[in-house]
Every structure is written in structure tokens, then in C-alpha cells.
Image (tube, rainbow, N blue to C red):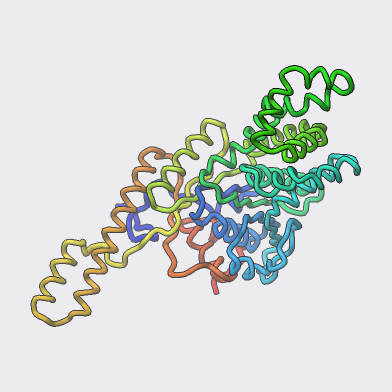
């Protein structure tokens, strides 16, 4: 009979050895993906701390961490620049830097790095660019990939980090992260962009000829929809941005190749709810289709039981007997609470087993639900121990002891 997992039930499938994964020096990038609200940010932070306290030089890229979590990592001034996290146990020789993605600043940095001063300023001052860089759908996902590429290039150049842990944006769909470069390419190659670029590319009399043909019809329609000033801002932005389009596409393709490289590992993070596990299943299948390396599934917020041998039926029957006597009301209420908990665990187990039945070779680690949020380094260490549950490598000689 299989040994019980942290939830009090047998493991769902092959055990995901996260201790071994982040301890493997060949793994240089770990990407935590999943639907929004499943605990990706905390998982990424805990894994990064765990790796650092076991001797790796780590940088973690977080996306909008909870305020208390950010403060616990000494990141009240967190910005687009990696900063050292205080309080990390360095006895094993590791270190931990952290940063929070600033979507607009990352976009601005790209413009400043790849355009001459006058063109860059024209872009940065453009009202359409200012809206695009801060709120355009998919921009955050693309900028997360852009920043990952920058961090990897810096690590290769300086040797500053040997592991990058990425927390992906809290998108409605986990697939948004993988689809961001393709969406950007479709946007850059779209007919609307080509139409808006036509005047700038034509110039002089040719410009007038363009206006006198189909272009005037299109811009007339757009003017009615967007307004003359908005359309002018868009045209000005597209004309100024034209020289950067190729660089965007090239870097997106480069980062996509990085994600497929042997030194990268994806962790799919989910909770035992129907939508989250469905999203995890879609993402797992997509990674397989794209040939991207999947580390396994982190199943967060799993409810556990200390008395799995007491079924809901037995608990309810005992509660009814006690209530019939008019005594031990507190015990009866506790038995009813136990029955409710066991039913919840059974539902979660059923949903999780549907995932493992569809993906029997995917390693899984279960993380038991906590009574409150993780808000300090010790909380992250406790979470990391749950993440490394069952990992023989976690107790390897020389590993820093952080169990305090």
C-alpha cells in the first residue's frame, strides 16, 4: 500500500521531486504557470528561497506580490531592478535577489535601448503608446517574457545568477503567457498596422495618392470610431515605432527558444478546483505540443484530514446518536464538521484524480491549505518544505538547515 501523502491520502501519482529539480545545476530557469489566484507568486518565492539556502545564486521575478509577502522579503522598494533579499541563510553559499515586473518601465527600457534619442522621446510622449504600455491586453505577458530574456542575458554575461525563477502574470488563462509573442507578432503583421504605416512609408505625392484611394475610406471610418486626435496619435506612434517592430519579433522568438531549451523547467500551479485543474490540463497539453519541458504539477491548497478512517457517514451517524441523547453537543458538532471536511476532500480528490488519469506521467506535489497567508521568510521556508515533500535530495548532505 502506498505511503500517505501530506493530505493524509496516498499520493496522486508520481511524486514531483522539487528539491531535486531546483538543486539540479543544469536547470537554470523555472517558470511557474497557471490560472490567476492559484498561488504562483508565493510558490515562486518559496522555491527561490529554498534554492538560495541550498547554495544557488537565484533571482526571482515576481508579478504583483501581496503587500505582506513583498514586505517579508524586504521588497517594500521593489522595482524593475533585482535587489538582494535580506535574511536569507547563506551558509551554503547561495544568494537571493528579487524584483517585481514593472510593465511600463520594461516597455520604456526597450524603446530607450533600441531607438535613437529623438525617436525614443517621440514614442514615450505619444498618448497611444502611454496607454499601450500600461494597459494593452497581453502587454504584461509579453513584458514578463521580455524581462526573462533580459535576466537570462545578464546571467550569461556576468555569471551573477545560476537560477532564474519566474512568476507569470495573473492572467485569466495560463496560455496567455505562451501566446503573448504570437499575439504580438499578429499585431505587428496585422492589416491595420500596415494601413496606418502606409502614409509614412509612401511620403510626398505618393502619400496623397494613397489618401485618394482606399486609405481615405479606412481612415474616415476609423476617425468616426476613434476620433480624429486618437487616430492621429495611433498613426504617429506606429510611424515612430516602425523601426522597433523587427526587434520585438526577434527577441520574442529568442525568448521562446529559451523556454524550449533543456535548462528550462515549467511548473504548472493549480488548486483542487474544476476550472484551475482544467486550465492546468490545457497548459500541460500545450507544453507537450510545443516541446517545452514540464517539471510537474504543484497542487496548492489541498485540504487534509487527521482521521481518514472516519467516513462522513460514520461521523454523521455518531453525531445523530449524540444529539439524540441531548449531550455532547460540541462533540456532535465537531463530527459534523469532520463530515463536511471529508466530503470536501473527496471532491478535491476526484478532481485531482481526473487530472492524473489524463496525465499519468506528470509528477505531482500536494501542498496542504494553510489557515492564513504566507507573510514572512519563515512562512516561505515552511511552504518550501511542503513543496519539497518526498524529495530525497532535500535532505542531501550539505543542504542548509532552515528548519527553525
Tell me residue 33's x, y (percent).
55, 47
Indicate the quadrant where residue 67 lies.
bottom right
- Farthest residue, direction bottom: 327
Tell me residue 81's x, y (percent).
76, 57
Residue at position x 26%, y 69% in the image: 337
Question: Is 5 situated left or right of 231 in this image?
Answer: left
Indicate the quadrant where residue 355 lies.
top left
Relative depth, front residue between 376 and 35: 35
- Farthest residue, direction left: 325
The quadrant in which the C terminus is found is bottom right
Question: Does 279 appear above or below 325?
Answer: above
Relative depth, front residue between 182 and 74: 182
Relative depth, front residue between 397 and 223: 223
Residue at position x 44%, y 40% in the image: 281
- Disc tally is 0
Question: Is 320 situated left or right of 59 in this image?
Answer: left
Residue at position x 52%, y 30% in the image: 289
Indicate the quadrant where residue 192 lies.
top right
Question: Does 201 appear above or below 241?
Answer: above
Tell me residue 73's x, y (percent).
65, 67
Tell me residue 239's x, y (percent).
81, 33
Question: Is 130 situated left or right of 383 in this image?
Answer: right
Amino acid at each position: 500500500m502506498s505511503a500517505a501523502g501530506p493530505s493524509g491520502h496516498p499520493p496522486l501519482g508520481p511524486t514531483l521531486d522539487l528539491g531535486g529539480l531546483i538543486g539540479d545545476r543544469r536547470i537554470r530557469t523555472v517558470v511557474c504557470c497557471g490560472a490567476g489566484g492559484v498561488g504562483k507568486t508565493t510558490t515562486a518565492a518559496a522555491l527561490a528561497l529554498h534554492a538560495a539556502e541550498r547554495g544557488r545564486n537565484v533571482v526571482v521575478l515576481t508579478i504583483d506580490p501581496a503587500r505582506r509577502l513583498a514586505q517579508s522579503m524586504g521588497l517594500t522598494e521593489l522595482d524593475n531592478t533585482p535587489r538582494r533579499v535580506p535574511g536569507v541563510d547563506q551558509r551554503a553559499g547561495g544568494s537571493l535577489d528579487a524584483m517585481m515586473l514593472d510593465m511600463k518601465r520594461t516597455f520604456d527600457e526597450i524603446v530607450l535601448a533600441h531607438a535613437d534619442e529623438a525617436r525614443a522621446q517621440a514614442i514615450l510622449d505619444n498618448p497611444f503608446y502611454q496607454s499601450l504600455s500600461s494597459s494593452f491586453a497581453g502587454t504584461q505577458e509579453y513584458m514578463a517574457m521580455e524581462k526573462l530574456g533580459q535576466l537570462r542575458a545578464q546571467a550569461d554575461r556576468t555569471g551573477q545568477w545560476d537560477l532564474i525563477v519566474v512568476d507569470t502574470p495573473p492572467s485569466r488563462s495560463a496560455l496567455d503567457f505562451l501566446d503573448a509573442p504570437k499575439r504580438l507578432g499578429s499585431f505587428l503583421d496585422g492589416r491595420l498596422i500596415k494601413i496606418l504605416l502606409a502614409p509614412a512609408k509612401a511620403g510626398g505625392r505618393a502619400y496623397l495618392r494613397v489618401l485618394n484611394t482606399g486609405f481615405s475610406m479606412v481612415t474616415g471610418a476609423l476617425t468616426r470610431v476613434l476620433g480624429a486626435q486618437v487616430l492621429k496619435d495611433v498613426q504617429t506612434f506606429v510611424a515612430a515605432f516602425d523601426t522597433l517592430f523587427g526587434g520585438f519579433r526577434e527577441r520574442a522568438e529568442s525568448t521562446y527558444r529559451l523556454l524550449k531549451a533543456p535548462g528550462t523547467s515549467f511548473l504548472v500551479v493549480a488548486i483542487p478546483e474544476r476550472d484551475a485543474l482544467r486550465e492546468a490540463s490545457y497548459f500541460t497539453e500545450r507544453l507537450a505540443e510545443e516541446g517545452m519541458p514540464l517539471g510537474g504539477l504543484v497542487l496548492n491548497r489541498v485540504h487534509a484530514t487527521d482521521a481518514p478512517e472516519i467516513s462522513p457517514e460514520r461521523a454523521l451517524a455518531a453525531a445523530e446518536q449524540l444529539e439524540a441523547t441531548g449531550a455532547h453537543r460540541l462533540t456532535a458538532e465537531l463530527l459534523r464538521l469532520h463530515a463536511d471536511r471529508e466530503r470536501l476532500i473527496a471532491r478535491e480528490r476526484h478532481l485531482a484524480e481526473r487530472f492524473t488519469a489524463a496525465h499519468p506521467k506528470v509528477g505531482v506535489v500536494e501542498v496542504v491549505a494553510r489557515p492564513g497567508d504566507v507573510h514572512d521568510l519563515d512562512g516561505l521556508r515552511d511552504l518550501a518544505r511542503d513543496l519539497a515533500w518526498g524529495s530525497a535530495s532535500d535532505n542531501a548532505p550539505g543542504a542548509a538547515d532552515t528548519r527553525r
